[in-house]
């Protein structure tokens, strides 16, 4: 066993490989709130992050980055296809998102999912110090808590699901549902984005296993397992700092000028994923143009669709449908040099994103289903002048936090269209009051508070460089 007192286990490491022209590999820290939130805890506790390095084949040797030990786990090309693209993203992902797209089950995918989870568990069991704390992340690794509990019952294990957790009726469709549920119950603390997800999980323990949960707890083999909500957030201060730079302010002005100084800029920023509601959003915009409630060039839309899972058939088909709809709108309503929709199938750095957020009058975050959606929170944090308006799906977890947004039902096209118009025509005072309230909330509920609340519930003393595992408080 190693001496790692605190371990994070995730599908990916918090760094990306950068290969130069000579083939030399260096590592660059990945963007994202999860890394920002957990890095201080990992550093303080001499922590280790276990994850896949992002390329097929033999894993690189363990290395250190910013005081954190990074331990790569090997995945073969076949495992990437079956474990990651297959069971994780073609079986679990659509099912957990209310089956908005048909899920696909393959028995060979499950075998690979099991084997990869077992590999992660074995690496973690080998690296963890006696009584260490392990925090496992997300749907790709739902078997790891149970497998790790079998190997190392001395560990304190937490699990956090970053996506929705389905109701009983949907989860029951899942082959190997018992194994997944038992895998999650290997944890001492199972965290979700919203309270209803935790309730769904506890209901399943009763329905499938005959347990009798009480409140947030269920007893498993004389252990108390807690299931609760811990809504994730963003690094609010960092987002505000970027948004406040002269570089971003100037770029936002340039964007508006490049678009012809329209009265209303609608903005969507999403991974190109069928759960995000991009097709419905485009259709709503097209119908508003048809109805005459909006018109080009007074109103334009920017849709950023970050490439995602481009080898998965459902995503290839989605891209084709989205691009066809963009072409239709621009063909019918665009003008020479003035498209109705500016479609960008690419990634942007945080400065360009912040400029887009500042340039937008209406931010459309309208997923059909989403665990949280941090884009909505990034937009709010970027509104230094409080002039923007957020149209937010009721089915995004963020709707429970950003209650002053213009909430819409993306499954109801009429409601979605009305939400766009209401947000676009709201008074400056109304928008300012809403935005100020949301920004105040985000300053108090940032990603650091999320990490602290989960780890405190798990029993980790805040930023303790060395602690006595025996002194950890119990889960209840």
Image (tube, grey):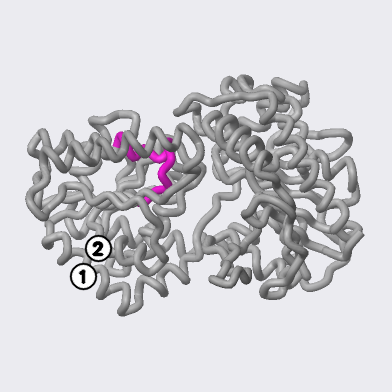
Residue 27 location, quadrant: bottom right
Residue 155 locus on image (x, y percent): 85, 52
Image point 17% across, 39% down: which residue? 329
Disc 2, disc 1: CB below 8 Å?
Answer: yes
Apparent side of residue 388 relative to residue 196 in the rendered image (left or right) = left
Q: Residues within 10 Å of mark 1 (few under 14, many from 20)?
A: some
Is 470 or 132 nearer to us in this picture? 132
Image point 56% across, 37% down: which residue? 89
Residue 154 locus on image (x, y percent): 90, 50
Image point 80% across, 39% down: which residue? 146
Res 244 label = none
Apparent side of residue 260 relative to residue 11 in the rendered image (left or right) = left
Residue 251 locus on image (x, y percent): 26, 71
Residue carrying label 1: 253
User: On screen, 293 above or below 246?
Assistant: above
Is 313 or 453 nearer to us in this picture? 313
Q: Looking at this view, name the residue that lies furthest to the bottom.
A: 246
Apparent side of residue 17 relative to residue 234 in the rendered image (left or right) = right
Q: Is residue 328 visible?
A: yes
Residue 130 locus on image (x, y percent): 91, 58
Residue carrying label 2: 359
Residue 174 location, quadrant: top right
* Secondary structure of the residue carrying numbered label 1: helix
Q: Is residue 274 magenta?
A: yes
**Span colored in magenta:** 269-280
Q: Is residue 425 visible?
A: no
* Secondary structure of the residue carrying numbered label 2: helix
Q: CA distance from mark 2 to mark 1?
A: 7 Å
Image point 85% across, 39% down: which residue? 223
């Amino acid at each position: 066993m190693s001496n790692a007192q605190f371990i994070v286990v995730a599908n990916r490491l918090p760094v990306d490989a950068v290969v130069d022209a000579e083939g030399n590999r260096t590592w660059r820290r990945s963007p994202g709130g999860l890394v920002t939130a957990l890095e201080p805890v990992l550093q303080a506790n001499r922590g280790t992050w276990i994850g896949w390095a992002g390329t097929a084949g033999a894993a690189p040797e363990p290395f250190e980055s910013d005081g954190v030990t990074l331990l790569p786990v090997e995945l073969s090309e076949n495992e990437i296809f079956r474990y990651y693209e297959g069971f994780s993203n073609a079986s679990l992902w659509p099912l957990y998102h209310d089956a908005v797209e048909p899920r696909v089950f393959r028995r060979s995918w499950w075998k690979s999912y099991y084997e990869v989870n077992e590999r992660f568990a074995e690496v973690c069991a080998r690296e963890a110090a006696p009584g260490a704390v392990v925090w496992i992340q997300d749907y790709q690794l739902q078997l790891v808590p149970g497998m790790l509990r079998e190997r190392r019952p001395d560990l304190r294990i937490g699990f956090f699901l970053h996506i929705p957790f389905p109701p009983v009726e949907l989860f029951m469709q899942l082959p190997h549902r018992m194994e997944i549920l038992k895998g999650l119950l290997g944890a001492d603390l199972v965290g979700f984005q919203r309270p209803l997800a935790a309730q769904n999980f506890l209901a399943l323990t009763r329905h499938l296993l005959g347990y009798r949960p009480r409140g947030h707890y269920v007893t498993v083999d004389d252990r108390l397992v807690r299931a609760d909500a811990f809504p994730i957030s963003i690094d609010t201060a960092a987002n505000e700092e970027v948004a406040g730079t002269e570089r971003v302010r100037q770029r936002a002005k340039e964007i508006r000028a490049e678009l012809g100084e329209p009265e209303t800029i609608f903005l969507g920023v999403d991974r190109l994923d069928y759960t995000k509601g991009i097709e419905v959003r485009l259709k709503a915009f097209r119908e508003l143009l048809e109805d005459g409630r909006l018109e080009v060039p007074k109103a334009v839309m920017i849709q950023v669709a970050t490439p995602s899972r481009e080898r998965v058939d459902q995503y290839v088909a989605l891209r084709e449908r989205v691009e066809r709809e963009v072409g239709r709108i621009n063909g019918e309503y665009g003008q020479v040099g003035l498209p109705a929709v500016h479609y960008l199938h690419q990634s942007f750095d945080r400065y360009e994103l912040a400029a887009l957020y500042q340039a937008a009058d209406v931010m459309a975050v309208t997923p059909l289903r989403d665990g949280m959606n941090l884009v909505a929170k990034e937009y709010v944090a970027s509104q230094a002048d409080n002039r923007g308006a957020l149209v937010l799906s009721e089915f995004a977890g963020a709707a429970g936090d950003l209650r002053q947004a213009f909430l819409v039902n993306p499954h109801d096209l009429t409601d979605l269209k009305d939400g766009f118009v209401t947000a676009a025509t709201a008074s400056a005072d109304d928008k300012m009051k809403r935005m100020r309230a949301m920004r105040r909330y985000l300053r108090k509920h940032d990603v650091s508070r999320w990490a602290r609340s989960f780890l405190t519930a798990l029993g980790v003393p805040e930023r303790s460089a060395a602690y006595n595992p025996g002194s950890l408080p119990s889960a209840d």
